[in-house]
Amino acid sequence: MATHDAADEGEEASARALRESTPGDAPPGPDGVPVIGNTLQFVRDPVAFYARCAAYEDDVVTYRVATSDGVMLKHPTDIEQVLVTDDADYRRASIIRNALGQIADGGLFLMEGEAWGAHRTALQPSFYRDRIETYADMMARFADERAAEWADRDPNAGPIAVSEEMRTLTLEILAKTLLDVDIRGRESAIRDAAAVISDRFDAGSLSALLPLWVPTPANRRCRRAVSRFDDAIADIVAERRATDEAFDDLLSILLAVDPDDGTGESREGGGLSEQQIRDHLFTFLFAGHETTALTLSYAVMLLANDAERQARLHAELDEVLGDGTEGSAADAERPGATDLFELDYLDRVVDEALRLYPPAYTVFREPTRDVELGGYRIPEGSTVSMPQWVVQRDERWYDDPDAFRPERWTDSFREELPDYAYFPFGGGPRHCIGMRFALMEAKLVLATLAARFAFDPVSEPPLDLSMQITLQPQQPIEVGLRTR
Ligand code: HEM
């Protein structure tokens, strides 16, 4: 079933040889207009623009957006070279630094070099499996309580906007995990900041490409929301420092770690400044909630549109979570972290949703010196884009690439798939630190909701998408709900 058998590998090798036989030439790419290059094409319809770049036979494509020279890499080998092998020759791309630098400069996402290494080492244990598993019960409980609200809806209320529901649920879960704050049903600076910031970074508007100091209305709103968020965080941190009570959240770890003592171990007193704590929390909140919400929303939409595969998931949930009697898992215990080992089809559903609709639809890097990629010389400072959106739908690696087929993820398929033909969480030293957290949350929430409800199709694939900071549906994703 995997498409990358020996014959294909042969073809692939000859395609690469052909490409590498022309070093020195510029890679091909869509024509743009002088000065702004392809900016308008990109802003008007980023998905179509990506499709145009994907259509070139060459695995390296150039374009120009705003003031930067863009290079798109489509081959897993080139992507691995950038993210893993030659990671030291790259840094965060300036389009990312310009966009996020003014709101989370000292967070893990934007840090570089030794400071990044020290903080990553210090924070890593907060994301180890045993630590993450302590959040499992809360995640499933929050999902279960949301499901109970759904069950109480007026049966004539019509479809539910699952994308909105998942966005608030994942934010609530993250606020609880990071700060031990329950923001459910309350006005919250965290919730407001999340909404305004996603608006600000909508790539469908030119303002997303402008720095935050330019006084556009979206920028002003964004700066006000960030400042309210900062006040709220400062209050929480101050209260926490003033109490002896023990907490089991990420903030308590941030207050204890000292990245500069070289061991990455927590120690009494802690070594992070208020600003560093704020920047890390901000980064986790914004890297963590929308991405996980999108994973869930796309998975639910795909299941709603595929009765057979949804039935297969229900059967697995009934078998693993049910009490052994005839019927569904609807009345069963909430799923826990250990149940996930047995929920193999659930695993595949989530992996397939992340393949088709990767919330982080591209990873960017910028070479700090001239480099060679796929046989082409790429100048220092170019914006290298490695789009999961394109690579994970490439028919060289996936049969029927646009189809939702969770069962493709057999062990042998996983083994044969080239590294970096699937990388929803990035790769190399800067891969997503929250990957385990996100996967556990997505599976527990999906298991909890699908055990209680059947989803009926309303929004249908292919969805109209917009490439904001994450891959967003243009309209809210809706499904019908039936209690099981
Ligand atoms: C399905 C959900 C998620 C997806 C698809 C996702 C995707 C990614 C990707 C692709 C990267 C690498 C970016 C790059 O190399 O440029 C990344 C980095 C990162 N992610 Fe996630 N992420 C998810 C959830 C989370 C969660 C839940 C958290 C935290 C609670 C988180 C925190 C981070 C941080 C801090 C980084 C930067 C790591 C570093 O540079 O050392 N992410 N994520």
Image (spheres, grey):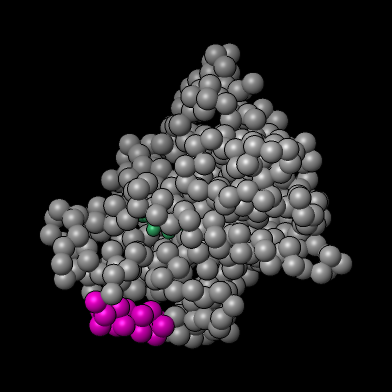
**Closer to the camera, 307 or 10?**
307
Number of numbered discs overlaid on the protein picture: 0
At x 57% / y 21%, what residue is drawn? 4
Q: Give percent across and percent down for residue 51.
A: 66, 45
At x 74% / y 67%, what residue is drawn? 152
As drawn, 121 above or below 168? above
Query: Which quadrant of the structure image shows residue 459?
Result: bottom right
At x 55% / y 14%, what residue is drawn? 6
First to last magenta residue range: 230-244
Q: Main secondary structure of the magenta part?
A: helix
Q: Give percent across and percent down for residue 305.
A: 78, 45
242 is within the stretch colored magenta: yes
**Closer to the camera, 90 or 476?**
476
As drawn, 84 above or below 246? above
- Give the residue furthest to the front: 325
Q: Quadrant of ligand 1?
A: bottom left
- Give the residue furthest to the right: 156
Image quarter of the N terminus? top right
Q: Give percent across and percent down for residue 33.
A: 62, 59
**Closer to the camera, 455 or 217?**
455
Q: Is residue 32 visible?
A: no
**Closer to the camera, 448 or 432?**
448
Query: Which quadrant of the structure image shows residue 170?
Result: bottom right
As drawn, 430 above or below 37? above
Q: Give percent across and percent down for residue 191.
A: 54, 76
Q: Is residue 146 visible?
A: yes
At x 42% / y 64%, what residue is drawn? 177
37 is within the stretch colored magenta: no
